[in-house]
C-alpha cells in the first residue's frame, strides 16, 4: 500500500492548484476532491486506505 500512497502523493504534487478542487473519487457514496483525498492519504487514515483501494480498482494507481 505504501507504493500506491507514494504514487498518489507524487501525482498530487504535480497538479495545478485549480484541479485540486475537483472531485477525484466517490467512496461510500460521498465525493472526495483531490485536496480531501490528499489529506486522508497523507495522514494514513482508514478512509485514505479505502480511497487508495478504490483508485487502484479504477486503474488510476
Image: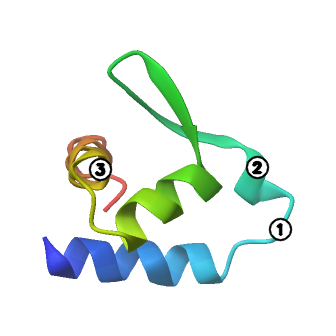
Tag nearer the camera, 3 or 2: 2
Residue 26: x and y in percent read 44, 28
Quadrant hosting residue 33? top right
Q: Distance between the residues labelled 3 and 1?
A: 23 Å
Neighbourhood count class around disc 1 (C-alpha, 10 Å): few under 14, some 14–19, many 20 upward: few
Residue 8: x and y in percent read 41, 71
Residue 19: x and y in percent read 77, 56
Identify the residue position indicated by label 2 in the image: 21
Q: In the displayed structure, does residue 19 sit left or right of residue 58? A: right
Residue 36: x and y in percent read 56, 51
Q: Distance between the residues labelled 3 and 2?
A: 21 Å
Q: The N terminus appears in which quarter of the rendering?
A: bottom left
SS for callout 3: loop
Identify the residue position indicated by label 1 in the image: 17
Q: In the displayed structure, does residue 52 sit left or right of residue 22? A: left
First of labels 3, 2 by sequence position: 2
The outermost residue toward the right is 18
Which numbered marker is on residue 59?
3
Which numbered marker is on residue 60?
none
Q: How far apart are marks 1 and 2 (CA)?
A: 7 Å
Q: The C terminus appears in which quarter of the rendering?
A: bottom left
Neighbourhood count class around disc 3 (C-alpha, 10 Å): few under 14, some 14–19, many 20 upward: few
Q: In the displayed structure, does residue 34 sit left or right of residue 56? A: right
Q: How is the image coloured?
A: rainbow
SS for callout 2: helix
Looking at the image, which residue is at 33% across and 83% down? 6
When the figure is inspected, residue 25 is found, relative to residue 51, above or below; the finding is above
Quadrant hosting residue 2? bottom left
When the figure is inspected, residue 14 is found, relative to residue 17, above or below; the finding is below
When the figure is inspected, residue 54 is found, relative to residue 36, above or below; the finding is above
> Disc 3, disc 1: CB below 8 Å?
no
Amino acid at each position: 500500500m505504501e507504493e500506491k500512497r507514494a504514487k498518489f502523493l507524487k501525482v498530487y504534487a504535480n497538479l495545478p492548484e485549480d484541479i485540486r478542487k475537483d472531485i477525484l473519487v466517490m467512496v461510500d457514496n460521498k465525493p472526495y476532491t483531490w485536496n480531501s483525498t490528499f489529506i486522508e492519504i497523507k495522514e494514513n487514515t482508514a478512509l485514505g486506505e479505502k480511497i487508495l483501494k478504490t483508485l487502484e480498482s479504477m486503474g488510476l494507481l
